[in-house]
Image (cartoon, rainbow, N blue to C red):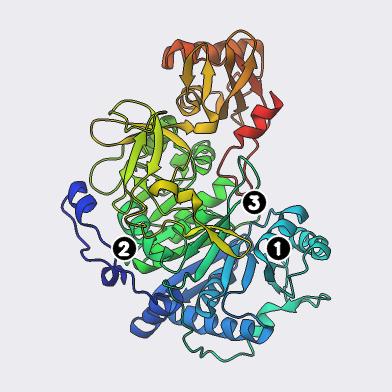
Amino acid sequence: MLADRYLDRVKFDSYEDFKSNYKVKVPEDFNFGFDIVDVYAKESPDKKALVWCNDYGEEKIFTFGDIKKYSNKIANFLVRTGIKKGDTVMLLLKQHYEYWLAAVALHKIGAILIPGSFLLTKKDIAYRNNAAKVKMIIAAAEKYIIEQIESAMPESPSVTAKALVRANGVDGSEKREGWLDFAGEYAKESDVFERNKTDLKTGDIMLTYFTSGTTGMPKMVAHDYSYPLGHITTAKYWQQVHDETLLLNPADSGWAKFGWSKIYGQWIAGAAIMSYDWDKFIPDKLLRIIEKYRVTMFCGTPTHYRFMIQEDLSKYDFSSLEHAGTAGEPLNPEVFNKFFEATGLKIREGFGMTETSVFLGNFEWGEPIPGSTGRPAPLYDMDLINDEGKSCADGDEGEMIIKNLDKYHPVGLMAGYYQNGEIIKDCFEGGIYRPGDMAWRDTRGYYWFVGRKDDMIKCSGYRIGPFEVESAVIEHPAVLECAITGAPDPIRGQVVKATVVLVKDAKEKGYEASESLIKEIQNHVKKTTAPYKYPRIIEFVEELPKTLGGAKIKRKEIREKS
């Protein structure tokens, strides 16, 4: 574990001790590729870093010695192709093992990494290419991905090179006009790469995430080279990984959850990553991977857990699992309780954004509380404010903020939004960052998520947060997923609307979309939470609209159709 080299202290006696005394040491020339990967390769070259498998029976295991060797080869190939410090390269690689190798290579060069989802369309890709001045795209050799990229090229003048990576069931070395054979090209290169200087003082950017675009066009979130160190908190103290951990997170490499759970903090804290490179998310297959590879830590979105608990969990061996975690959206208590009944594990919820590392979490001190996002991480000065901008008392709803940024910029918080080659910092005006989420805090300091500020519903003078109502609806045995939104009403201003996906065996359980089921769900909610919060409108759908990564529900899209 290298985490102890970047912390003043590693062990803490209590959450209060952790909150008061946790400090990260950030060298001005820190580079994840050289200072983490290559240090492990020197000191523990045979230490396991990555276990990869797919649905075709293929498996590969990489040590840190391997990661150093291949990342150096890729770095030399990219430099030969014309990539230099400050250039932007987009990776659309799903969960292929060469994502890790290419990402580390880009960090060593000092190029800006842009992770991209394999579900991006031609429009999405062209937008990203132009907004970030992408110079090169490295993509999995899958028909859909290739078609979208090639159709975006006439509108992408900055892109000068494209490379194909072998994908599941597809040989990336097949010749395709206008594309480089990624593996074939880097195989020719030296496995020695001299250190490039990256500097926090000069504002060098390590990677740029595009936000999920739930409320508008995606923004470019820029993180500097200190970003991986911010995720020590995420990995070591929230996910509780250690030198013997094998962590599985199903996130696609295009999303910040991948950076949260599948590379930076985990490797710094000594864990190995399990990558299951599936073609399609099938809960039974995922559960079999946990069982087969003896995964010790699983961290998925609430969506993953909602589908997993629909399986007969008694069929699976969970004896290797030490911890379970979730982030992406708040976790409904019903899902927490069912998973606990089946596995004996209490899911530790964490909360944060593309712009941050974990800033709320159920850390190792104290039992996780169903429905609570936990307590503030020590790197962030958190508060709740009311409409007048004053701090809220315990028990009162307010807007979450990160404050005092004019005095201290937390490690893991974005450098700013990237625009026209500049870092825009006006999101930190007045020393405050406003994520846009509503919550309340109990007397123990635990935060309870209410909903996005934009998603709050005002009905007959009451302000209703969607999460509490969603949690009540999802407790009904017929419901798999639910999104609560406000629908216009001439008398009340807005009424609560529930958009519901039924469980896959609803008919076998005696349920079907009908007026009688609507009444049953409404009565259930009236008994579970305050009666005025019940959904006056219920619509049954096959699936909910979600962001490309599948982690977040696009409530704005539902509202616009109401």
Marks 1, 3: nearer the viewer: 1
Left or right placement of residue 500 versus residue 295 in this view:
right
Between 105 and 500, the one lying in front of the other is 105
Residue 242: give its label: 2
Between 477 and 352, the one lying in front of the other is 352
Three-letter code for the amino acid on which mark 3 is drawn = Lys
Tell me if residue 304 comes above or below residue 128 in the rendering. Answer: above
**Crowding near the residue tagged with mark 3, few <14, some 14–19, many ≥20 C-alpha atoms within 10 Å:** few
Q: Residue visible at 32% across and 59% down?
A: 236
Image quadrant assignment for residue 408: bottom left
Q: CA distance from mark 1 to mark 3?
A: 27 Å
- View extreme (front): residue: 430
Of pointers 2 and 1, the one earlier in the residue sequence: 1
Dot 1: element: helix
**Crowding near the residue tagged with mark 2, few <14, some 14–19, many ≥20 C-alpha atoms within 10 Å:** many
Report the label total.
Answer: 3
Examine the rendering and report whether any part of residue 160 can be seen: yes
- Which residue is label 1 attached to? 129
**Crowding near the residue tagged with mark 1, few <14, some 14–19, many ≥20 C-alpha atoms within 10 Å:** many
Three-letter code for the amino acid on which mark 2 is drawn = His
Q: Percent from the top left, x then y, of residue 262?
A: 47, 61
- Which residue is label 3 attached to? 280
Examine the rendering and report whether any part of residue 432 can be seen: no
The quarter of the image holding the N terminus is bottom left
Marks 2, 1: nearer the viewer: 1
Of pointers 2 and 3, the one earlier in the residue sequence: 2
